[in-house]
Image (cartoon, rainbow, N blue to C red):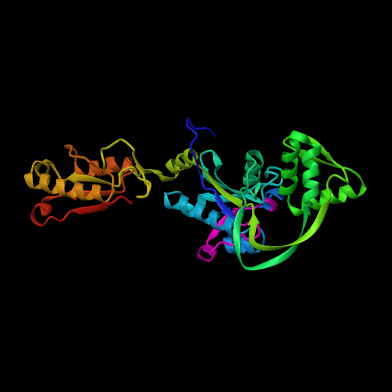
Amino acid sequence: TRQREFTQAEIEYFVNPKQKDHPKFALVESTVLILFHADAQLNAKDPVKMTVGEAVRSGLINNETLGYFIVKTWQFLVSIGLKKEYIRFRQHLPTEMAHYACDCWDAEIFGSYGWLECVGIADRSAFDLTAHANAAKCDLQYKESLEKPFEREVLILTKKSGVDIMKAFKKDGKMVKEFIESQPQEELECIAKKLETGDADVQVDGRSFTLTKGLAVFERKKEKVTVNAFTPGVIEPSFGIDRIFSMLLEHVYSARPKDDKEDDKQTRGVLSFAASSAPYKCVILPLDQRIARDKRYLEMLDYFTRELCEQGLSFTSDESNATIGRRYARNDELGVPFAVTFDFETMEDSSVTLRERD
């Protein structure tokens, strides 16, 4: 489904890949969601209702942080006016999951086109920063200070081998030496093992360099570790703003039933926007033209609108000759949730009538 524009909003939330607990997960773990997990899709079963806490503990949702953002996405969609029963979360199938992703869920909203994907919430592991670090040739690891430093044995290139490699590869020597020294322990162990039986090739900046047994010599050394360095993983909720708004219009629209006694042949539509998503928060209405022409009304209106502006609340007004009922209906069609009516009592005691659309 395509709109005329494509507007996307994303959150990049970085986590320790080995510790994906979330400090606020306990606040949301009892939230019940409609989950369409991969097994249910593959076995032609219906989606299930369960708490996000159950889903995380059972391994259905990979980790707490991912579960937390799934709930926050649901809360956001409900808060702007989408109906709870028409929001579900569908897990990506193994065939559509990105190769680097740990888990991925789509928030789907039901409308006239069926279930439509509107938000993607993915655990992209450490793929993004690793790719950036490799392309930019810079260190993007996070350094976490340890409360209790410890010693560990590490494999390193000897100083003599470093010098020999720089001489052997001439102008490329420094680049090759720095590349080897920057490799994680697992990769250095792999190179050293290959050199026990022959040569080892390394790929640096798209080019291949051959290391011989006598050229690259490693030694084991004990070092004190004071920081835990790791490349952060990322949880990425990605919101399709246009699709969400299209579904919102479908969910909040309704037609008010006609009264048999009414002469009005026109169907009166209503946009039941939540106050948080309504373009105008309220409409200001004088009861009739006698109020609209009263100097006291103009003075109170000026004071009241300034108060609304100070609170950052958007508003509109309707001082037409139509009856108050028709003006209420007119603003219901525009999705305005509140109406503030100035009547004859207002002229006496400065009180107004507040009408809530729903």
Give the vertical position of 151 relative to 190 (above or below): below
The stretch drawn in magenta includes residue 44: no
Give coordinates of residue 293: x percent, y percent: 9, 41
The N terminus lies in quadrant: top right
Does residue 228 appear to the left or right of 171 in the view shown? left
Q: Which residues are magenta?
A: 16-39
Whether residue 48 can be seen here: no
Residue at image coords 11%, 44%: 298
Give coordinates of residue 257: x percent, y percent: 35, 44
Give coordinates of residue 191: x percent, y percent: 83, 48
Does residue 95 appear to the left or right of 289 in the view shown? right
Residue at image coords 62%, 39%: 136
Residue at image coords 28%, 45%: 314
Question: Which residue lies most toward the right here?
Answer: 197
Whether residue 284 can be seen here: yes
Give coordinates of residue 304: x percent, y percent: 18, 49
| Towards the viewer: 266 or 92 | 92
Does residue 253 appear to the left or right of 142 in the view shown? left
Residue at image coords 15%, 56%: 351
